[in-house]
Amino acid sequence: SSLTRPIFLLQQQQQYTTTRTTTMGANPSKTTSMTPAAQEPPPPNNSMAAATSTIAAPSQLLSEPPKPRQQESFLDKAFRKFTEQPLVPIGCVGTAYFLISGLKSFSNRDPYQSQKMMRNRVAAQFATLMAFMGYMGIDAFDFRLAPMTQEKEKYERMMAEQAAAEQAMATATTTSAESQKKE
């Protein structure tokens, strides 16, 4: 899940991050040192920025922040939930049907039919609850084999690609500098 980060990524992130905190009235130029690639100018000295802390980290470890979602209307949310988990609303409708039918049988003084409908209502409620729990379990379960290993390998590939790109950039810079010296 995107909400949880593997432990090794958190450890890597802690190696590269430094938290800078300032308090009201403190000098903003007095900050803790950061990695050279992550140097930032000090924050403006105002009351809003004075009480905040910032974290500087390489862009490889932190993904782009999520875009804010628009507020869903009730119908949009109901349609989305119905398409994602169709058995839950169907079970709710079935439960409501058996409840209303059972109450109607009770008011007609038909104890056999009333008892049958109430038993069916309990079964429908149980099936709805199991469907809901099943959908929750499917959403929470990670189907990848060895997810920590896969995340670590992905991270290592990404770091190797970045190192290769930086080396290529350094080589290109030195060759262009050498060609300018020759001219």
Image: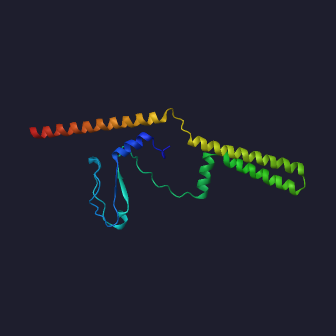
Q: Residue drawn at (79%, 54%), measured in percent from left and top? A: 100
**Residue closest to the far left:** 183
Q: Nearer the viewer, residue 130 or 29?
A: 29
Task: Report the coloring of the rendering.
Answer: rainbow
Q: Residue drawn at (72%, 45%), measured in percent from left and top? A: 126
Q: Position of residue 183 (x, y in %)?
A: 9, 39
Looking at the image, residue 82 lies above or below residue 53: above
Looking at the image, residue 77 lies above or below residue 47: above
Q: Position of residue 58 (x, y in %)?
A: 34, 46
How many marks on residues?
A: 0
Q: Position of residue 39 (x, y in %)?
A: 28, 51
Q: Residue drawn at (69%, 46%), measured in percent from left and top? A: 129
Q: Residue drawn at (29%, 61%), measured in percent from left and top? A: 28
**Residue closest to the far top:** 145
Q: Nearer the viewer, residue 24 or 56?
A: 24
Give the left or right position of residue 38, taking residue 108 as reference: left
Q: Position of residue 25 (x, y in %)?
A: 32, 67
Q: Nearer the viewer, residue 154 or 177?
A: 154
Give the left or right position of residue 104, taking residue 159 as reference: right
